[in-house]
Image (cartoon, rainbow, N blue to C red):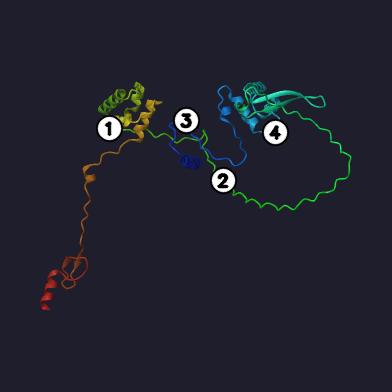
Amino acid sequence: MDTQHDIALAHALTGIPGPLPPSGVIHVAIPHTSRFTIVGNHLAQHAELSLAAIGIGVHIQSLPAGSQVGIKALTARFAEGETTIASALRELETHGYLHRTRVRLANGRMVTRTVFCNHPGALPRGGAVAVPMPVVAPPAPVPAGPPVLPVVAAAVPEPAPEPAPVPEEPHPPVRVPPRTAPKPPRRPLPQPRELTPELRRASSALLADLRRHAEELLLCEQDIEELVPGVAAWLERDTQPDAIRHALTADLPQPPRSPAKLIRHRLTVLLPPPLPGTSDLTPVRRTVVIPLQNCDRCDHAFRATSPGHCRGCRSELLGAA
């Protein structure tokens, strides 16, 4: 299943316009067709709100009207305690997203009215949020008077039915492999057939000299000792030191997170093949061998592609004719 996840994610990334960023998050944005809430960046990226306050604000904004959003209700819904949730609600109230007011009902009961504003910055400066107060209106009395005659309305043609909307094709889900997915094993460092003292000395000198050409590639003695076999494998394959140095120092990330791991990776994946010998470069010559045949007249052996007569018998037969 991990391979399918990787293929689906790679296919989704190819559809993203423009070059991908070298680091950081990459968004795979799939349009929602149902069950979604529009949240402003002024809330999702608020510089002064805590992460708990931003999360609770987004949650309250996604709820339908009439939902319970008190401390007890949110504590029963989330794993955070009452202290954290109460502090987050106070933050939202301080920055104008949440308004809590005590009002008195018609029966004299005091209740708390909660109003959530999804964009407090768009409110008039200095304006207050009007808290709705339920009022039960008494039934209107029926006025006495003459009976009202029924009015016959003129026939109005029914409007033409609107065409049914074409359902959008659902987007295939993008399955991202979980963080706990097993990673492929790391390829081993190349090893020479024989690590001679000359190869060890030349490899150590090349690794220690890398910092002259790229100051980011500063290696300690232990790293050099571990990477020596990889450089020796390159030298054993008749690779010039300048070519090895260029392969290890070209197009370095800025800054490299681990110089030793970077060099180990390049020594492993960029290992060149051995140089072919002279005999390997010589083209193969194919020799056509003509089989031996026995003459049908004198039984003498001769070379020909098909049975028949030898050269002498053919001459005698031609002369007799």
Left or right position of 104 against 6: right
Q: Nearer the viewer, mark 4 or mark 1?
A: 4
Give the residue at mark 1: 243
- Mark 3 or 1, nearer chain start: 3
Tell me the mark number nearer the camera, choosing from 1 and 2. Answer: 2
Circle 3 or circle 1, nearest the eye: 3
Amino acid under disc 2: Pro
Residue, disc 2: 170
Answer left or right for 154 relative to 292: right
Q: Residue at x 37, y 26 (%)?
A: 260
Marks 4 and 2: in contact by CB < 8 Å?
A: no
Q: Could you tell me residue 129's position as x and y percent? A: 68, 26
Determine the secondary structure under disc 4: loop
Secondary structure category for the residue under label 1: helix
Mark 3, residue position: 24
Q: Residue at x 29, y 29 (%)?
A: 245
Label 3 SS: loop
The numbered mark, 2 or 3, whose residue comes first in the sequence reads: 3
Mark toward the start of the polypeptide (3 vs 4): 3
Disc 4 marks which amino acid? Answer: Ala
Camera sees residue 194 = no
Q: Disc 4 or 1, which lies upstream in sequence?
A: 4
Type of amino acid under label 3: Gly
Q: Amino acid at mark 1?
A: Ala
Q: Return the residue nearer the eye: 95 or 21.
A: 95
Tell me how far mark 1 sits from mark 2, CA to CA: 52 Å
Return the disc, 1 or 2, that comes first in the chain's sequence: 2
